[in-house]
Amino acid sequence: MPKLKTNKAASKRYSYTATDKVKRTKANRRHRLATKTSRQKKSGKIQDAYADKTVEAGIKKLLPYG
């Protein structure tokens, strides 16, 4: 059976945790960080989150090897 290709766009946006959950990065963490307070940057609003269960199956197809 041939190897499955990993979707490169998905691999840059998602990753797996040790318990096989899909982790994603939230928005507002790329630029204009000088205008945001330390509290905003450290809070859970901008940090990593888990992908929704409804899209997790689709992401796992795009990332066959984790």
Image: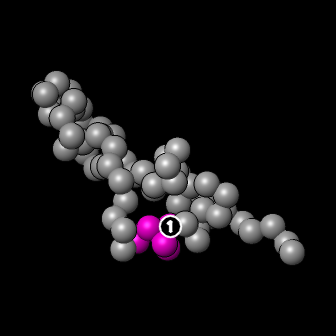
Q: Is residue 63 left or right of residue 53?
A: right
> Residue at 21% across / 40% down in the picture?
44
Is-magenta flag for residue 56? yes
Q: Is residue 66 left or right of residue 27?
A: right
> Residue at 67% across / 58% down in the picture?
65
Q: Is residue 4 left or right of residue 16?
A: right
Question: Percent position (x, y) of residue 66?
Answer: 61, 54
Question: Percent position (x, y) of residue 52?
Answer: 34, 65
First to last magenta residue range:
55-59
Question: Percent position (x, y) of residue 17?
Answer: 49, 46
Q: Is residue 31 above or below residue 14?
A: above
> Residue at 49% across / 49% down in the picture?
19
> Residue at 86% across / 75% down in the picture?
1
User: Which secondary structure class fits the magenta region best?
Assistant: helix
Three-letter amino acid code at the position of disc 1: Ile
Can the viewer see residue 15?
Answer: no
- Crowd rating for badge 1 (residues with CA inside 10 Å; few <14, some 14–19, many 20+): some
